Amino acid sequence: MRPRFCETDALGHINNTVLPVWFLEAREPVIAIFTPDPTLSKNGLAMVHMDITFKAESMFGSPVTVTTTIGKIGNRSLEVVQRAWQNGALTAVGKATLVSFDTVARQSQPISDIQREQLQQHLDGPDAEQPPT
Amino acid sequence: MRPRFCETDALGHINNTVLPVWFLEAREPVIAIFTPDPTLSKNGLAMVHMDITFKAESMFGSPVTVTTTIGKIGNRSLEVVQRAWQNGALTAVGKATLVSFDTVARQSQPISDIQREQLQQHLDGPDAEQPPT
Amino acid sequence: MRPRFCETDALGHINNTVLPVWFLEAREPVIAIFTPDPTLSKNGLAMVHMDITFKAESMFGSPVTVTTTIGKIGNRSLEVVQRAWQNGALTAVGKATLVSFDTVARQSQPISDIQREQLQQHLDGPDAEQPPT
Amino acid sequence: MRPRFCETDALGHINNTVLPVWFLEAREPVIAIFTPDPTLSKNGLAMVHMDITFKAESMFGSPVTVTTTIGKIGNRSLEVVQRAWQNGALTAVGKATLVSFDTVARQSQPISDIQREQLQQHLDGPDAEQPPT
């Protein structure tokens, strides 16, 4: 993705509030495993925890790549691990804990076997710590 | 309202995409005339036109006052006139044309007499061109 | 560009404040004609007017294409015409009047012949009113 | 602060990417201890870690109160603890680790005694876990 000029701040770099937005955008394929259309479906993913470690500034003018992998998978929740890269350098690592959620019943629900299989194809590992090519 | 640091951009001032957000926030009392809870009601206001003239930069660190008045009132639409002020200076003038909208039937609907009376209590005029005190 | 889930609002569509952000992103090649790096250069484009006509809702889940052409070119200012398309339909038309600006001297400056030539290669016309393919 | 309508998403609540923005706004008095004007000063606070636990949804239509206290204070860094409340309920807890930063030399710098004294007047404690009145 390309940083937007309005995502910079007066310090000349990307404001730290923008990383959660980029990570959300890059998490969409994970969300799609649970709900084909998050604006309509009763199934969703509720965020219970977000954790971002900032390694370096993100700047305007160079593309950013966000990689998304799956950490732990629980009965009703999963951890998504995300890394933002710019110019070959790791700029931020994000972890999001998401709960499978029935938005009508308003309660958590188990992760199905089919969902689990799809998630397991994208497990985090040493490869994800290498810069994307 | 107070400008947020993340609303600045790398040029050191408030990014021009922020003014529509401030104007939307300041338009909420107008929206409330049509729908007590815009997240639930079938009645809403659909924006058909937005027009902003930028008079001066908006800066971080000083409060901004947005005044909201009503311009023309039609059968199904109205014009909202908004002015952003900072440190006594007019920084932006916005005009929004909004249509009363039935979000279930997905079509415009007439402005009611009660709505019209409420709108007419806030008509734009020379007073609105003076800095707020 | 792909709409971001956080760009939706409680009405289930893209909030109207997002269009100025998309248009800004799509205007970057125009900005690049005036300043190779807007975070560093003394040359810039100051927005004096923004005008958006909303033709239809923008929705999450389908890509959006924004076309950017040049309208009138003055001595020190230019008009940028932008159209947002989704699923073959025109959803919004934006016009932005921008002034060539010396951010150090803090005053407008003439558009150079080189800049004018580059702008003239992207003039608005009937072709731009057709859906992008 | 009042939630903005554009901060909702298609699920009808405040999008999770908005909490970091609210927390940044509420952190401004902490930033002011380090730099009177973050758009101009060479002193700043660089974020190295952000951590948010979501306890409940935040909704449009009711004011949100964010309390800000200071957790651990190190030699060059500090932890800011923030809690968002709406309608008497705790909706989110955020922790931000910030490093005192010289933006010209581009390196961290010690927290001064004066800064430390000011921070110590706002230490986190059991009182901060009670709903604001």
Image (cartoon, coloured by chain):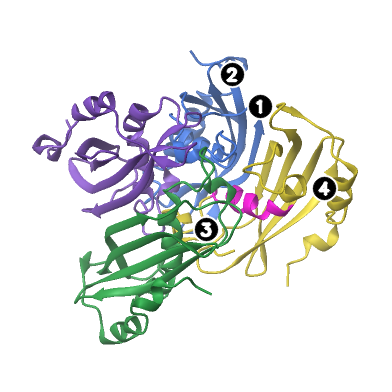
Chain colours: A purple, B yellow, C blue, D green
Residue denoted by label 3: C106
- Foreground residue among C71 and B132: B132
The reply to whether the C-beta atoms of the residues labelled 4 and 2 are less than 8 Å apart is: no
First in sequence: mark 1 vs mark 3:
1
Disc 3 to disc 4, C-alpha distance: 34 Å
The reply to whether the C-beta atoms of the residues labelled 3 and 4 are less than 8 Å apart is: no
The amino acid sitting under disc 4 is: Gly
Disc 4 to disc 2, C-alpha distance: 30 Å
Residue C55's disc number: 1
Residue ranking furthest to the left: A126
The reply to whether the C-beta atoms of the residues labelled 1 and 2 are less than 8 Å apart is: yes
Disc 1 to disc 2, C-alpha distance: 9 Å
1 and 3 marks on the same chain: yes
Of all chains, the one bearing label 4 is B
Q: Is residue A7 above or below residue D112?
A: above
- The residue sitting at 29% across, 45% down in the picture is A97
* Residue B22 is a magenta residue: yes
Left-right relation of A126 to D2: left
Of all chains, the one bearing label 2 is C
SS of the residue under disc 3: loop
Q: Is residue D97 above or below residue C115?
A: below
Q: Quadrant of residue A77?
A: top left
The amino acid sitting under disc 2 is: Ala
Tally the numbered discs: 4
First in sequence: mark 1 vs mark 2:
1
- Magenta part of the protein: which range? B16-29
- Foreground residue among B2 and A75: A75
* Residue B129 is a magenta residue: no
The amino acid sitting under disc 1 is: Lys
- x then y, percent, for residue D24: 41, 62
Residue denoted by label 2: C89
